[in-house]
Amino acid sequence: MTATRFLIAGRVQGVGYRDFVRREASRLGLCGTVRNLADGRVEAVVVGGRAATDALLAACRKGPPFAEVTGVGLEPLSDEPQIDGFVILRS
């Protein structure tokens, strides 16, 4: 299991991006959180296996139909958050 922080930039707020990430992560069996940041980016903290995390990364780079992703930054996390399922946090 790995924990990774994704920082997604572009037109990713107001286009259903967080729900897209939640649905994809749940489908892949990942746990974690997703939230909007004040600077216009979306942050996802993802916990799970490498293959599933890589699959979510590929989905995040594409995004839902109305999103325009310009970049996805990754940061490995040393601590794995203890989260059941994948949830959208209030911004």
Image (cartoon, helix red, strand yellow):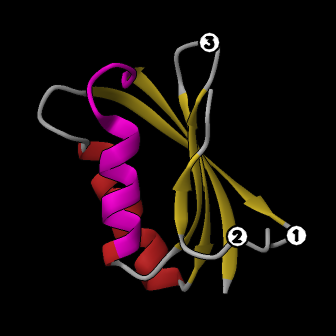
Q: What crowding class fits label 1: few (fewer than 14 Cα within 10 Å), some (14-19), or many (20 or more)?
A: few
Above/below status of 35 relative to 14: below
Q: In the rendered view of the protein, which quadrant contains the N terminus?
A: bottom right
In the displayed structure, does residue 68 sit left or right of residue 73?
A: left
Identify the secondary structure beneath mark 2: strand
Question: What amino acid is labelled 2 in the image?
Answer: Ala
Residue 47: x %, y % from top left: 63, 73
Q: Quadrant of the C terminus?
A: top right
The kind of residue on which mark 1 rests is: Asp
Q: Are marks 1 and 2 in contact (CB under 8 Å)?
A: yes
Report the magenta residues as a range: 11-26
Q: Position of residue 83 (x, y in %)?
A: 70, 71
Q: Residues within 10 Å of mark 2 (few under 14, many from 20)?
A: many
Residue 50 pos. (x, y %): 53, 82
Tell me the residue that label 2 is attached to.
Answer: 3
How many C-alpha atoms fall within 10 Å of the one at disc 3: few (<14), some, or many (≥20)? few
The quarter of the displayed image where residue 10 is located: top left
Residue nearest the observer in this picture, 55 or 85: 85
Any magenta on residue 13? yes
Left/right of residue 48 with respect to residue 26 in the rendered view: right
Residue 54 appears at what percent x and percent y?
A: 42, 70
Residue found at x 38% / y 52%? 21
The residue to which callout 3 is attached is 39
Asked if residue 26 is positioned above or below residue 40 in the image, the reply reads below
Q: Amino acid at mark 3?
A: Asp
